[in-house]
Amino acid sequence: MAMKRERRAILKDMARRYAQGVIENLELIWQFEEINDEEEVVLMQREIDAIAKRIGANRSFASTAPAVEYGPTPGCKQCEEAESCGFTDCPECDAQLCEDVNGTGFRPGYKP
């Protein structure tokens, strides 16, 4: 039994929503009728695979945390002074000396 055009369009839309649901809200998918026909399941999986392939070609799933190297800039006198004063950043070259976990601009545990 061949699928009707409307049902095929709904299944493709569900597959698109499913792929977006990774980022958005998966509950949108379950507003539609239950998928129980083997042909529908195959179509749905084919659409999901195609969308995932397109997403994978355009995105990198590496860590979203920026790669930050902490420490003074070699030869920068202000970095040395900023470190000794407990700052997290060098005012001269903007090097990040350590992570500013408190949001104060001073190293954790530093008492000004």
Image (cartoon, rainbow, N blue to C red):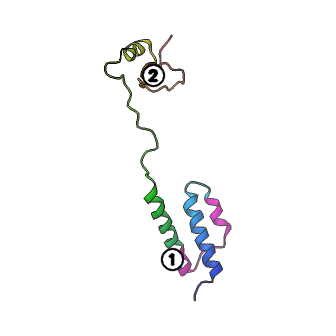
| Quarter where residue 85 is shown | top left
* Image location of residue 20, percent across then percent down: 57, 59
Any magenta on residue 51?
no
Extreme residue toward the right, this view: 31
The quadrant in which the N terminus is found is bottom right
**Residue name at image x 44 percent, y 59 percent:** 56
Locate residue 73 relative to residue 29 in the image: left or right: left
Counting other residues with Cα less than 10 Å from the Cα at mark 2, is it few (<14), some (14-19), or many (20 or more)?
A: many
Locate residue 51 relative to residue 25 in the image: left or right: left
Residue type beneath disc 2: Asp
* Image location of residue 68, percent across then percent down: 41, 33
Any magenta on residue 29?
yes
| Residue behind mark 1 | 42
| Quarter where residue 5 is shown | bottom right
Q: Secondary structure at mark 1?
A: helix
| Residue behind mark 2 | 89
Range of residues picked out in magenta: 26-43
